[in-house]
Amino acid sequence: MNGSALDFLLPLAIVLPMAGAATTLVVSRRPRVQRFISVGTLAVQLAVEILMLARVVQNGTIVVNVGGWTAPFGITLVADELAAFMLVVSTTVALAVLVYAISQGMADESETPETPVSIFHPTFLILATGVSNAFVAGDLFNLFVSFEILLTASFVLITLGGTKERLRAGAPYIVVSLLSSLIFLSAIALTYAATGTINLADLSVKLPAVDPDIVATLQAMLLVAFGVKAAVFPMYAWLPDSYPSAPAPVTAVFAGLLTKVGIYAIIRVQNLLFPTGSFGTLLMIAALLTMVIGILGAVAQSGIKRMLSFTLVSHIGYMLFGVALGSTAGTAAAIYYVAHHILVQTALFLGVGLIERVAGSTVLARLGGLASASPLLAALFFLPAMNLAGMPPFSGFLGKVGLFEAGVQDGRVLSLILVIGGTLTSLLTLYAIVRVWGRTFWRPAPEVTALEEPDDALQTESGRSLATRRAAQREALRQAKRREAGEKAARLPLGMVGATTAMVAVGLLLTVAAGPIYQVAQDAAEALSDRNQYVQAVFSSGEPLPGLDPGSPAAANGQAGGGR
């Protein structure tokens, strides 16, 4: 450790959810105890991470060498401003989704074969462990292990219940994830063969001495591996088919967090290992195509879940645009936009779960009249939807303004094309959102007889039948008849509404407190641009390493422990 009394907070961010997962597995026959342990674990973890973020902002990077083995020989955990900020955002989302899932399970009495709660809680906490470990991993292999932890947990969650439809939808996700893991593992092996190390700080020092062709090969392999996980074009096709099939809270946490871990990995390696801007043009083209193809796919959808899944792909393009610029302004805007999108996308998918509960469907042809049936639900969907579309003064607008300003400052033709492409994508996002909101909430409810058409009533938005086709149809007909009779919508579980409201509120907080939060993103981007600061924090001897810029602030000060 660096010697600070608060450095113990860093391993706690990983140990807490891991211990919580083991404990919930032990008490798997006692659902109430499981719920208490799961919520308590994530609540304490969030408090720890808020303290850690305050510590990092005030005093600089925290570094912990696991087992006392110093870098580059041991496992190093590093929490700089970017990692600490992402930890707080991700655990906030995980806690809200967990409360939502518990409330939904209690309302449905879901301790049934289709949603085995005894498996859900330990798996969810394992997922949280993998996400947290990915953000603080100080070497490539630990980052790989983090991906495998969260992917293993996600395999279980996406196929929860073991229905034929979920297994079929989860198959592409599993195959693609394993393929990207194989590429990542191969890249790690080649990196070690070329440099003799996989520690990120050590690599940033040694890679400049490696043959440029080998460096370019390593960079390309890492970008492909992380690009698959982030659903960057053309490696995004698995996402719109996989996410909508999962239960609502699982889809929400996947949409909010999993692709962002891939974006985080791209931000980290591009700034720390490959700061020369190589592949910048290729990343810009990928960002533009991801934006445009994703939003065109969203506009063409007839179901809300698949529409949101395609907007998720599209908005990954904005984040990649900020990274591709290779400037501090672009990176800062990308970091802010990542936080914004995690919160907003999670809130929207939680809202879709409420829509499905009220209307019995998420297919647009079978929806309508929900604004009068449930005004609160209309507001809970409208606010994050406008935020996603980038309407002023929401955080989506502020993030895009930051990205576009960075693009204009860059001045390259491709950057300006991306600014134009981003503007058009934003307008198409607004069109897709308004279309969904109008059909779902504003227009009159469809006739009950229309729902009795078998080709319409028996199909989900993904084109696959539900596990309980007849039950879904009966629910849709019952809700439609209730609305037709002028009755109010069924009362929604308080925990589900509360968790969704919390996500909407936190998303709005990103607008209200945009100044200080954007400053955290700006500070994180500036720290990323100074590789020497990260290296000195990891190698806490205080002596500048060979290859470091002697004129850098960190090298000049010889600060150990990452103090700024």
Image (tube, rainbow, N blue to C red):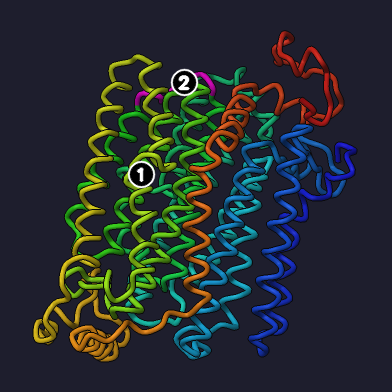
For residue 452, above or below residue 409:
below
Q: Secondary structure at mark 2?
A: loop
Q: Is residue 76 left or right of residue 123?
A: right
Looking at numbered disc 2 in the image, what kind of residue is underneath it? Gly
Residue 413: image location, x then y, percent: 28, 17
Residue 80: image location, x then y, percent: 69, 36
Say which quadrant the C terminus sits in: top right
Instruction: Using the rendered view, name the quadrant where residue 75 is placed.
Output: top right
Q: Is residue 162 left or right of residue 111?
A: left
Residue 309: image location, x then y, percent: 33, 57
Q: Which residue position holds label 2?
A: 277
Q: Residue at x 52, y 37 (%)?
A: 335
Q: Residue at x 41, y 55 (%)?
A: 345
Instruction: Using the rendered view, name the quadrant where residue 489 is placed.
Output: bottom left
What type of secondary structure mainly makes up the magenta span? Answer: loop
For residue 252, above or below residue 268:
below
